[in-house]
Image: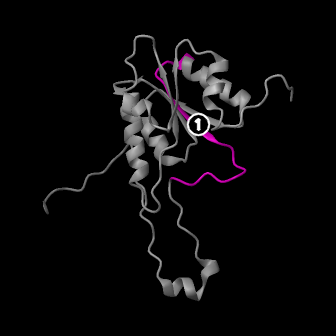
Amino acid sequence: MAGTPERKWTTLRTIAPQAEVSLAEVDACPESIVAPETTMTAVEKGTPASVLVAHPVASTARLIRETLESFTEARVFSTADPLRAFELALQRRYTLFFLAMQVGELPGPMLYELISRAYASERGPRLLAPGVVFVREKDDPKLPDALARDVRVKDVLIKPIRIERLLDSVRGVLEVKDPTVRG
C-alpha cells in the first residue's frame, strides 16, 4: 500500500492529534503549558448549552429551534443534511441532539451511532455522546429496543409536536424558563 495516494477529505474537518508533553517540560514550567485546542471543546460552566437539530423538514427544525431559544438559554444549531450534522457534531461540544428518525437518506439512530462512536474514539478521556431526542413521523418505524433503553435517549417526540411536550423532553438536561414569568 506504499503506492496508494493519501486521501484528502473535503467535507469533514481533520481533528488535530494531541500534542505530546514530556514530564520534564511539566516540571520545568507547569504554568506555561496550555492544553492544545481541539475542535471539540468541553462545555464550561457559565457558557450557554448548545443543541444540534438535524431534521429534513424546515418548519419542524424551526419550531424546535425557536422554542428552545425562547424557553432556555441554549444556542441552537440546525441542519437538514445528515453529513453536515455529523460535521457539526465533531466541531463543537453539544449538550443535546434533536434528530429526525430519517435525516435525508440516513436513519437518525444510525447518525446518532456514528456520532457516539466518533465521541468515544476521541483521544483523551473516553467521552459519551450527549443525550438525544428523536423526532418521528406517525408512519416512521419505532426506535429499536436496545436504543430505547439507552439512558442517553431522553425522549421520542411524535409529530405534530406540542411545545409543552418538547419542553418536558429537555428538562433535566437544559434549564427551562418559566413561561408565565416575563423578562
Number of numbered labels in the structure image: 1
Residue 30: x %, y % from top left: 61, 81
Magenta region: which residues? 40-59
Question: Disc 1 marks which amino acid?
Answer: Val
Q: Nearer the viewer, residue 23 or 16?
A: 23
Q: Nearer the viewer, residue 73 or 143?
A: 143
Color style of the picture: one colour
Secondary-structure class at tag 1 = strand
118 displayed left or right of 72: left
128 displayed left or right of 161: left
Relative to residue 29, is residue 41 depicted above or below?
above
Q: Residues within 10 Å of mark 1 (few under 14, many from 20)?
A: many
In the rendered image, the quadrant that contains the C terminus is: top right
Q: Residue at x 58, y 54 (%)?
A: 42
Residue 58: x %, y % from top left: 53, 19
Q: Residue at x 52, y 38 (%)?
A: 131
Q: In the rendered image, which quarter is residue 113 located in?
A: top left
- Asked whether residue 33 is in view, the answer is yes
**Main SS, magenta residues:** loop
- Asked whether residue 82 is in view, the answer is no
Q: Residue at x 40, y 25 (%)?
A: 143
Q: Which residue carries the number 1 mark?
A: 51
Relative to residue 172, is residue 44 depicted above or below?
below
Residue 45: x %, y % from top left: 69, 52
Q: In the rendered image, which quarter is residue 44 located in?
A: bottom right
69 in the magenta segment: no
